Amino acid sequence: MGGVTQFRSGNGAAWLDLLAQLNGRYRERQIDAIENTAALREWLREYGQEPTGDITMADVEQVQVVREALHRTAVAVLSGDRAQAADVRVLARVLEADRPLGIRLNDGGIDVVRPESAGEALARLVRDAVQDLSGPQRAHLRTCGDDTCSGIFLDYTGRRRWCSDERCGNRLRVRAHRARLANPDA
């Protein structure tokens, strides 16, 4: 499929946009934007996490497994439920590849040193997710108001209802309009 930006959600954090790379998570038909090594490299590059080393299909599969464990964990945390122990173990294993960030000078300031591997890049994303889910950012995390969507986003206004107004917001407005047309007396 390719199209890293096809499902770019602008959800407020790279790890939230990683979750959005599986479109239709709660539907019969799903589309995974990170289905091969080229798509994973492109997505990581887009978020400043492109590794210096090779990316393999095993890396793609690991990202997919971790993404789903992270999604289930985030949904549990946001709904006040206990996260599944197996998912927390998956995330903890990924965090073992985490390293302190390195920096270097550039012409306009500094850059973060690129991760060496896809595993290290994934660990950085999981670190950010765990910090958001367990720290003060948690108060700003919301699930999409469209019950057919699995989107999670940061909302600093307290007014946002959907992960994407263009996609989910429009879909819900169309549903409401059709329901009013079908039952004008309601």
Image (cartoon, rainbow, N blue to C red):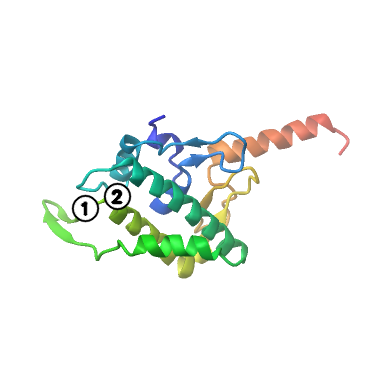
Q: Going 49% across and 59% down the picture, which residue do you hit?
A: 156
Q: Is residue 42 above or below residue 76?
A: above
Q: Is residue 33 left or right of residue 102?
A: right
Residue nearest the viewer, comparing 174 with 48: 48
Q: Is residue 154 above or below residue 34?
A: below
Q: Position of residue 67 (x, y in %)?
A: 45, 51
Amino acid carrying label 1: it is Glu
Q: Is residue 143 left or right of residue 6?
A: right
On residue 116, which mark appears? 1
Q: Quadrant of residue 41?
A: top left
Q: Going 73% across and 33% down the picture, which residue do you hit?
A: 177
Mark yes or no: residue 12 visible.
Answer: no
On residue 118, which mark appears? 2
Residue nearest the viewer, comparing 67 with 86: 86
Q: Position of residue 120 (x, y in %)?
A: 29, 56
Q: Going 70% across and 35% down the picture, which residue do you hit?
A: 175
Q: Is residue 182 left or right of residue 103?
A: right
